[in-house]
Amino acid sequence: MTGAQVNAMTPEANSLYQQACSAEYREDYKTAVDKLLQALNLANNDVMIYTKLAGVYSEMGEYDKALETYSKVAELKPSDGYIYLSVGSIYENLGKYQDALNAYNKVAEMCPEYLYNYLNIANVQYQLRDYKSAIENYNKFLSTYSQHIEARENLAASYINSGDFTNAVNEYENLYRRNPVSFKNFANYGQALFQVKDYQKASEFLEKAVEVNPDNTSAHVSLALSYQELGKNEQALAQYDVVFRQQPALSSIRFDYANLLADIGQDEAAIANYKIYIANYPNDFRGYQNIGVVYKRLNKLDDTISNYEKALALQKDKKDIALVEDLAQCYHLKKDYPNALKYYDEVLAVNKDDYDVKYNKALVLHAMDNYNDAIAIYTELLKEKSNTNVQNNLTSALLAQGDKYLQEKNYSLATETYEKAIQSGAKDGSVYFGLARSYRACDLNERAAENYEKAISLSPDNPEYSKEYTEFIASVNKTPDVQSNSSETGVSEGGIKEISLSMDDAKQSEISESEQNKKLIAAGDASFKKDNFDEAVKNYQAALKINPSDEVTLLKIGNIYYNAKQDNKNAINFYKKSIVVNPNYADGWFNLGLVYAHENNNNKAKECFHRVITLNPNYGYAYYALGLAYEEDGNTKEALNNYKIFLTHNKDAAVTKSVQEKIKNLEK
């Protein structure tokens, strides 16, 4: 035996020890302590008595005395590692988790066979927020005690706190499957599911969490965000309302709340909430960026620019290039061309091949009368692809530059530039008028006359061209010293066809896209009539690339999948898309309901048909479809009610007769 000598317990001491045990059992701890102290007077080095005394002190909450007594036990029997289990437990109760960990580590060192100790170690590591180590020890413990529910719950919580939400979801899923009735961790499970972006399932468990504990603000927040991600805006708004009633000063979620308000068009309310968020989180660039988006939608460009620039300043070296481009466009819309040019150049420094940005930069240069640089970019863009707007702007820039050279009396360059404008497609009389003046100034009268005549033929209603041509003819018949000074004049006031360099004009390409969209839909319709459904779908989908928010075209594709291909899954997908882009699209809701009815999902079918009636109370066949659904459910009363309403809308005699027969049979 190592350590101090341990005396054998005398009969008298043993009797006192037994009395102490009886008193402890009765929870008469004072008597138990008295008896044990008496026993120690008879056997002052007895480990058993000291161990019992330490335990009684612990039960009394006299932790300092308990620890002091366990220290004595350790002196008497230093090889006994198990006493450190009790020491660790006391420290744990006192919240001294590092001391508790030290004690449990001694148990692990001295009694490695005691595998249950892994749970003790893991629990205090969790309290110390050393989640990585806690996870390691929970898993060691569970490798032996795999059915231990509390350990698995703590392991799942450790995964959440360490940011390992995938493993947290797996643990909670196993716990829930094992015993769904006794499962209580709805909030943690739901929040873990939210973090792995399983928003539908997250919302289901978070709904249970707030049902069990309506005061769980965190669960309400995660539920609101889940609904928001699912596009369930009304439900999300309701949850935010609960959150702000419970914690009016909670500002951390004002950003997400403002995003929701902005998405549903409540712009002023969105701005108010972005401002609250910015006031509390002034260094989060997202607040400035998103409030800027709303201001831009409201055409408050100064406010937009101010907030965009704050957002970019906070981003420092990691600037969002899309935001820089948006800022450039705002300056462009304000016709602040130097700043627009500055930010377009920043974008091009990163995305040098961005076609649209290069085009916008060319428009800005054009508006700043920097025609040559604009011409260079227009020319480069046309090498990439044909574009009518770019071509027209190139022609206009060439014409303007030609006029500029003419004013500067640089006739050689003026002539060259006008010729390029003609090659580029200029068909306005002004280019030939400018060319005529340039040739006239160079005494190339024959060519000047030719171009005057061309200008007059293209613009016969412009009196200036005819007037100057008449004067030119008269002048060439005079002696050289009495030539007219008309060729010294600059560009005529009405001669140059103006181009608009606003952002709106830059968007004119959308018109051609709209025409292409119409052609593709028409081609799809034609293919559909010929039962060439694959070709129809191909054309419709091509049209949707131009206008992805076209609910009617989405419905047409859904109809093909439902009626022609009997592919309910894809039909549902496209019908749902039609009501996502337009929640008030009654036909989309009706056809979605038909597919659900076809799949015997009457509850969802009825939801759709009721939505149709809400949107359009005169949608007769929705009542008929509801009648069928209720009849299928055995709800005769509602079936009859809807059939009778349908008859007030129906004008088809054969259908009326059929429904009247249904009503007659149901009323028997």
Image (cartoon, grey):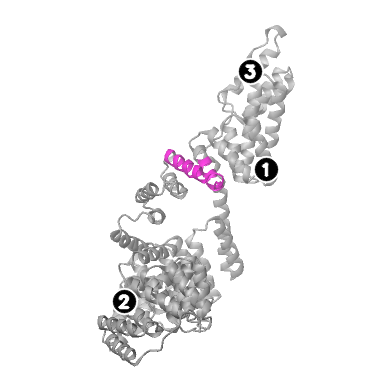
Amino acid found under the numbered disc labelled 1: Leu
Q: Which residue is mark 2?
A: 642
Residue 199 seen in the current view: no
Element under label 2? helix
Q: Residue at position x 56%, y 67% from top?
A: 528
Q: Which mark is residue 470?
A: 3
Q: Callout 3: 10 Å neighbours few (<14), some, many (20+)?
A: few
Residue 286 showing in the rendered view: yes
Question: Does 440 sit left or right of 285 as displayed?
Answer: right
Badge 3 vs badge 2, beta-carbon distance below 8 Å? no
Q: Residues within 10 Å of mark 2 (few under 14, many from 20)?
A: many
Q: Between marks 3 and 2, how big is the CA–CA gap?
A: 84 Å
Q: Nearer the viewer, residue 538 or 529?
A: 538
The residue stretch that appears in magenta: 302-329
Compared to residue 219, the image places residue 565 above or below, namely below
The percent coordinates of residue 448 (x first, y second) are: 70, 22
Q: Nearer the viewer, mark 1 or mark 2?
A: 1
Badge 3 element: helix
The residue where tag 1 is placed is: 382
Horizontal and vertical percent for residue 91?
39, 71
As for residue 523 lying within the magenta part, the answer is no
Residue at 58% across, 58% down: 520
- From what the image shows, is residue 433 above or below residue 564? above
Q: Amino acid at mark 2?
A: Asn
